[in-house]
Amino acid sequence: MNSLEFESKTTTVPEETGKKEYWIFGYGSLVWKPPPVYNKKLIFYYQDILKDMFGGFGRHRSTDHRGTIEKPGRVVTLIPIEEWKLLDDFHDHKEDDVTWGIVYKISEEDIKEMMDYLDYREKNGYTIHYLDVYQLGSGEPIVKNAMVYIGTTKNEEYVGPAPLNSLAQQIYECPSGSNREYLLKLASALREIAPDAYDGHLFDLEERVKSMIKRSEIL
């Protein structure tokens, strides 16, 4: 299985390979809020990489769509296992964890429009990379070199881990784009596309934020 290559590409649109279609691997909000134009979507996963969400995962902040400079939100990114081992973490992960997501097929005539849309949507520290993705039970990749947006640990929006209570409070208080919506819809979407999957970090955060919302409604 190929490891993820983290060097950035020089162009947003892949070089022509003779194919008339492109595949984009979506995790995070792209699971529940797809691009406006696509021809087909499939449920896939990526192995040998961990989903880093909200400070265990993302450790990636958002100061545009899901937060502000004064009150940044927390969003997801991907971190390779070997790199993860070198980081301090507040939440354990298994080495055989997989990252579930949706792969969208984009036609050649739509790819420029979709890349412009996604470049803007993922502008807050994310760059384009390529990886192989799998379906459940498949020993070989179903799609090779699917495009994916990743906020690496070297970008300025990567802020590192934080305790769950601190993350939950930050997500709950974030005023922009509803960081709560991002978290709750992602947890719900994961249960829908992969009912047997369990992301302890994500679901722990979900329960903490739901409790905060419930308390605020009582007061």
Image (cartoon, rainbow, N blue to C red):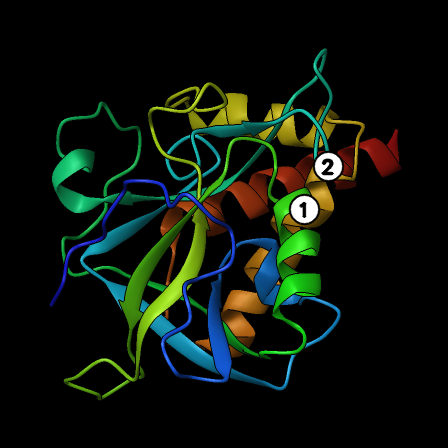
Is residue 82 at all visible to an observer of this figure? yes
Give the residue displayed 60% in from the left and 60% down from the top. 30
Task: Name the kind of residue labelled 2 in the image.
Answer: His
Q: Are marks 2 and 1 in contact (CB under 8 Å)?
A: yes
Give the residue displayed 63% in from the left and 86% down from the top. 39
Q: What crowding class fits label 1: few (fewer than 14 Cα within 10 Å), some (14-19), or many (20 or more)?
A: few
Residue 67 appears at what percent x and percent y? 71, 27
Q: Going from the N terminus, do you reach mark 2 or mark 1 first?
A: 2
Q: What crowding class fits label 2: few (fewer than 14 Cα within 10 Å), some (14-19), or many (20 or more)?
A: some
Could you tell me how far apart the alpha carbons at marks 2 and 1 are, in whole angstroms? 8 Å
Q: Could you tell whether 146 is left or right of 188 in the image? A: left
**According to the image, label 1 marks what residue?**
121
Give the residue displayed 58% in from the left and 38% down from the top. 208
- The quadrant of the picture occupied by the C terminus is top right
**Foreground residue among 142 and 60:** 142
Residue 118 appears at what percent x and percent y? 63, 53
Residue 48 appears at what percent x and percent y? 18, 58
Q: Could you tell whether 196 is left or right of 61 in the image? A: left
Residue 178 sits above or below residue 144 on the image: above
**According to the image, label 2 marks what residue?**
65
